[in-house]
């Protein structure tokens, strides 16, 4: 599990590309509104993962698990998000 925050865990799942860039506007607002939340962003592309790591207010960046039951279950069990936000 991911520790260190007392508030909800929010997982923002982005396709690589503009979705990561769009999240740069969303994440600081989420941080201001939910200062104790754990904000995690995932994407499937190494270049856009590097972009995500520079976004203000983000706690963790990771690769989105393959869209298969076992990897997704493992990610959900590890992160235990209160909310999953797909950005399309």
Image (spheres, rainbow, N blue to C red):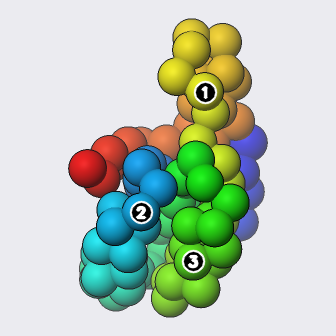
Say whether disc 3 or disc 2 marks the residue closer to the N-terminus.
Answer: 2
Q: Which mark is residue 17?
A: 2
Which quadrant holds residue 53?
A: bottom right
Q: Nearer the viewer, residue 31 or 54?
A: 54
Judged left or right of residue 59, residue 34 is left
From where the camera sits, is residue 85 visible?
yes
Question: Mark 2 or 1, which is nearer the eye?
Answer: 2
In the structure shown, which secondary structural element does the residue marked by tag 1 occupy? loop
Residue at mark 3 to residue at mark 2: CA–CA distance = 10 Å
Which quadrant holds residue 79?
A: top right
The reply to whether discs 3 and 2 touch (Cβ–Cβ < 8 Å) is no
Badge 3 density bin: few <14, some 14–19, many ≥20, Cα 10 Å: some
Height in image: 53 above or below 68? below
Rendered location of residue 46, percent (x, y): 68, 60
Residue at mark 1 to residue at mark 3: CA–CA distance = 20 Å
Rendered location of residue 39, percent (x, y): 51, 65
| Residue position marked by numbered label 1 in the rendering | 66
Rendered location of residue 84, percent (x, y): 38, 43
Q: Nearer the viewer, residue 58 or 6?
A: 58
**Which residue: 73% across, 42% down?**
1
Badge 1 density bin: few <14, some 14–19, many ≥20, Cα 10 Å: few
Height in image: 53 above or below 15? below
Say whether disc 2 or disc 1 marks the residue closer to the N-terminus.
Answer: 2
Q: How many numbered marks have been drawn onto this rendered protein structure? A: 3
Q: Nearer the viewer, residue 86 or 33?
A: 86
| Residue position marked by numbered label 3 in the rendering | 51
In the structure shown, which secondary structural element does the residue marked by tag 2 occupy? loop
Judged left or right of residue 29, residue 38 is right
């Amino acid at each position: 599990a991911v520790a260190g925050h007392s508030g909800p865990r929010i997982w923002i799942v982005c396709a690589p590309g503009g979705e990561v860039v769009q999240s740069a506007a969303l994440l600081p607002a989420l941080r201001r509104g939910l200062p104790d939340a754990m904000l995690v962003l995932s994407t499937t592309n190494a270049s856009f993962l590097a972009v995500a790591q520079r976004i203000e207010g983000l706690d963790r960046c990771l690769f989105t698990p393959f869209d298969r039951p076992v990897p997704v279950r493992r990610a959900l069990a590890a992160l235990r998000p209160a909310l999953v936000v797909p950005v399309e």
